[in-house]
C-alpha cells in the first residue's frame, strides 16, 4: 500500500488557508499556489539519493553531497496542474516537464484525455505528477496509468487538497505511488467537488467560470 504524506509545515498550512478563502482573487491565488508548490517540492524530494563529492573551497577540501542517480520530471495534469509547475521548477530548475491534458466529464465525472506531450527519457526519471485537487481520483489515476503504460516505474503524486475517496482510488489502482498533500478534507459533494476544498482550482487560477 502506498503512503500518504500530509505536509504540515506551518508555511504550507498558512498559505493554504489563504488559497482556500473565497476572498482571494486570481492574482493572489496564483502566487500562493506557486509558493506552496515550491515548499511542497522541497518535501517531496526529501528522499532523493545523494552521493559523496569533494570540492575545493578557498580554504581547503570539503567532503560534500550532490543528488545522484535518477533525475526528476514534473507532469502537471492540465489545466490546474500548471499552476504548481512554476513553483516546483524554482526548486529544481533543471527538471523536465511533461503535460497530460484531462478534463472531468461533468456527467460521469470520469476523466477524458485531450493532450499528452512527455519527455523522451521518461523511463530514466522520477516522475512527480502534479494536480491541485485529488477529488474522485479519476484524473490522477488515469494520468498515472498512462505514464505506466509508457514504461515509467517511479512515480509520486503531489496535490494541494485531497478527498478520502480520491486517496483510496489512487491507492487501490496504484499501490506503488506515494501521495503528497497539504490537506485531506472531509468529503466530496454531489458534483464531485471537495468539501470544504477551495472550489474549482482551474477557474480560480485562470479567472474562468
Ligand atoms: C480538476 C482538477 C483535477 C480534477 C480532479 O480538473 O484539476 O484534474 O478536477 O477531479 P477528480 O479527482 O475527480 O478526477 P478539471 O477536470 O476541472 O479540469 P481543469 O483543470 O481543466 O479545470
Ligand atoms: N476539481 C476542482 O477543481 N475542485 C474540486 O473540488 C474537485 C475537482
Image (cartoon, rainbow, N blue to C red):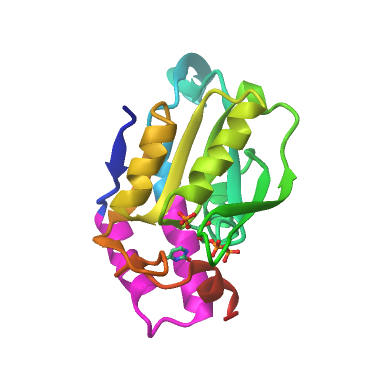
Q: Position of residue 24 (x, y in %)?
A: 41, 81
Residue in front for this viewpoint, 168 or 83 = 168
In terms of image quadrants, where is residue 175?
top left
In terms of image quadrants, where is residue 94?
top right
Residue at position x 29%, y 55% in the image: 183
Q: How many marks?
A: 0
Q: Is residue 197 magenta?
A: no
Residue at position x 50%, y 59% in the image: 109
Q: Is residue 131 above or below residue 157?
A: below
Q: Is residue 11 magenta?
A: yes
Residue at position x 53%, y 19% in the image: 68
Q: Is residue 43 visible?
A: no
Name the residue furthest front: 107
Q: Is residue 90 visible?
A: yes
85 sits left or right of 189 in the view: right
Residue in front for this viewpoint, 162 or 91 = 162
8 sits left or right of 84 in the view: left
Q: Quadrant of ligand 2?
A: bottom left
Q: Position of residue 31 (x, y in %)?
A: 50, 69
Specify the quadrant that holds the C terminus: bottom right
Name the residue furthest bottom: 23
Specify the quadrant that holds the N terminus: top left
Which secondary structure is most common in the magenta stretch?
helix
Residue at position x 54%, y 23% in the image: 153
Q: Position of residue 144 (x, y in %)?
A: 54, 37
Tell me the magenta residue range. Answer: 10-39
Q: Is residue 3 above or below residue 80?
A: above
Amino acid at each position: 500500500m502506498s503512503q500518504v504524506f500530509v505536509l504540515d509545515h506551518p508555511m504550507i498550512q498558512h498559505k493554504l488557508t489563504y488559497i482556500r478563502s473565497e476572498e482571494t482573487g486570481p492574482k493572489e491565488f496564483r502566487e500562493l499556489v506557486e509558493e506552496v508548490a515550491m515548499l511542497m517540492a522541497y518535501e517531496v524530494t526529501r528522499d532523493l539519493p545523494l552521493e559523496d563529492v569533494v570540492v575545493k573551497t578557498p580554504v581547503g577540501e570539503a567532503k560534500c553531497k550532490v543528488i545522484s542517480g535518477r533525475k526528476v520530471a514534473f507532469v502537471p495534469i492540465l489545466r490546474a496542474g500548471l499552476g504548481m509547475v512554476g513553483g516546483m521548477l524554482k526548486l529544481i530548475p533543471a527538471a523536465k516537464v511533461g503535460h497530460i491534458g484531462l478534463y472531468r466529464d461533468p456527467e460521469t465525472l470520469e476523466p477524458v484525455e485531450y493532450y499528452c506531450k512527455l519527455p523522451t527519457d521518461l523511463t530514466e526519471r522520477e516522475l512527480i505528477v502534479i494536480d491541485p485537487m485529488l477529488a474522485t481520483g479519476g484524473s490522477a489515476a488515469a494520468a498515472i496509468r498512462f505514464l505506466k503504460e509508457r514504461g515509467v516505474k517511479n512515480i509520486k503524486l503531489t496535490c494541494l487538497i485531497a478527498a478520502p475517496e480520491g486517496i483510496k482510488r489512487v491507492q487501490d489502482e496504484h499501490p506503488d505511488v506515494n501521495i503528497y498533500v497539504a490537506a485531506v478534507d472531509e468529503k466530496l459533494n454531489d458534483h464531485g467537488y471537495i468539501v470544504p476544498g477551495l472550489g474549482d482550482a482551474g477557474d480560480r487560477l485562470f479567472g474562468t467560470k
